Image (spheres, rainbow, N blue to C red):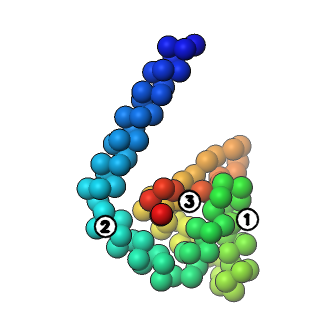
Amino acid sequence: MTLEKNLLAEILEKLQNIELLLKIGNREVIDKFQNEIKKDRVSKRILNFADGTLSYSDLAKKVAQNEDVAEITVKKKISYLKNNGFLLTKREGNNVYYEKSDLFD
């Protein structure tokens, strides 16, 4: 078990190094997206609520109610944020939960 644990720790460290290098190499692109998102109140609200506890439908409904916009608008923005790496998904049964990624610091 200890060997497996050490191997997993080593893999995690290497993955974190790769992630860091990718962020450094793409800093301008990431900054552009972050600035774009910061200007959009719906996207900001999605990221505020995306803590891994709300399903896709619940997240869309909550943001739509808080921002007084249509759910379809929120769902499109969730898709955009996910496709650009700002939201991560976790599937449990039939539900998909969203969590803010480390790209949005």
> Residue at (44%, 59%) from the top-left corner?
103
Whichever of callouts 2 and 3 sits on the residue coming sooner in the sequence is 2
Q: Is residue 27 left or right of residue 85?
A: left
Name the amino acid, label 2: Val
x and y percent of residue 83 in the render?
Answer: 45, 61
**Residue at x 35%, y 41% (from the top left corner):** 17
Q: Residue furthest bottom?
A: 68
User: Residue at left 47%, top 64%?
Assistant: 104
Q: Are marks 2 and 3 in contact (CB under 8 Å)?
A: no
Q: Report the residue marked by disc 2.
A: 29
Helix, strand or loop for disc 1: helix
Say whether residue 76 is visible.
no
- Which residue does the numbered mark 3 point to in the structure image? 100
Q: Is residue 33 left or right of residue 56?
A: left
Task: Name the front one of labels 1 and 2.
Answer: 2
Q: The disc labelled 1 sits on which kind of residue?
A: Asp
Q: Nearer the viewer, mark 3 or mark 1?
A: 3
Residue type for callout 3: Lys
Q: Quadrant of the N terminus?
A: top right
